[in-house]
Amino acid sequence: MRVPAVPPAAGRRALLPMVLLAVPLLLTGCGSESTPSGPTPSGSTAGADAADPRSQIAGFAALAQDRGLTAFYTLTVPGQPDRTVGVTRATDRSWRVDIPGGALGGTIDISIAQNADGIYQCALPSDMNHVDPVCVRVGEPGSTLPTRIDPRVQHAFADWQEVLTDRQAPLSVSTAEAPLGLEGSCFSVESTSASIAPALEPGIYCYDGSGTPTGAKLDFGTLALSGPPAAGPPTISLPAPVVDREPLEVGGPAAPSDAPSTRTVG
């Protein structure tokens, strides 16, 4: 085999720039098949880190709406004993919130529930008050309850979650430190509308990574998740039969009689 002649010094100097230019190109081609030296953040993680608070809370609230949930929350109101609120969100998006002392000035336990047929207020018997366990239809699904029969607690797990996912809602959102007794990612939410009836209660709302509401600090009190939640049922069931009579008022008069009344529910 013929051995190629070694080029003279001048030729070698002329070839040197071309060799130096070719080396990076060769290294680039080899590097395309190698494993990166450092971890690359996933698109979802990078997106979450870059999202503004308004987008973050909308994402948590969307997860809360989509998942079924059975959980208990401690309701703390200054000057009152703590109460345990039961929350059920079914996979068909029906829901039920059991509120001790939710009617008649705190003397009657009630449940506020919504399914495809309407919104219901149900009286729940307790050791203190042996009321008849009955439910009253108080509105169409998604309708607004009159103030006189609205205990407000249920909104934190129902329609206010829908408001938080609505990017057109007049809200101002910022990150917040978790209030005492609450955990998770927390956000301070204020209404930017001058409306007398804001879309939701201003306050601090907290979530864990799965979208479970871990609590909220609101004007009527503080709700805090009191234990690990369980899966929700396919649909909620009302705790009592439906009758036609006036619903119990939040701080209203004595409990109504069992006699049926003629009225229009809307």
Image: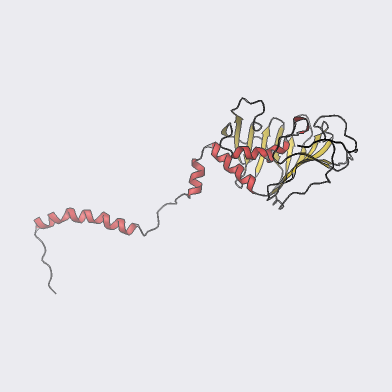
Q: Residue at x 65, y 42 (%)?
A: 213
Please state the horizontal and vertical placement of residue 81, each as a whole percent of the image.
79, 34
**Left or right: 36, with 106 as reference point:** left
Q: Is residue 14 above or below residue 254?
A: below
> Seen in the image, is 6 located left or right of residue 57?
left
Residue 208 percent location from the top left of the image: 62, 44
How many labels sit on residues? 0
Give the camera-side residue of 175 and 152: 152
Would residue 152 be found to the left or right of residue 252 on screen?
A: left
Query: Residue visible at 60% across and 32% down?
Result: 189
**Taking the image as drawn, is residue 211 in sight?**
no
Q: Is residue 113 above or below residue 103?
A: below
**Colour mode?**
secondary structure
* Quarter of the image with the C terminus in it: top right
Quadrant housing residue 65? top right
User: For residue 148, which quarter of the picture?
Assistant: top right
Tell me the residue at 52%/43% (across/down): 48
Q: As rendered, which of 262 and 221 lies closer to the eye?
A: 262
**Quarter of the rendering occupied by the N terminus:** bottom left
Q: Residue at x 29, y 57 (%)?
A: 27
Q: Is residue 187 visible?
A: yes
Q: Position of residue 32 (x, y in %)?
A: 35, 57
Direction from residue 231 to residue 135 in the image, left or right: right
Q: Is residue 42 above or below residue 85?
A: below
Residue 108, given in percent of the width and then of the height, sits at: 84, 36
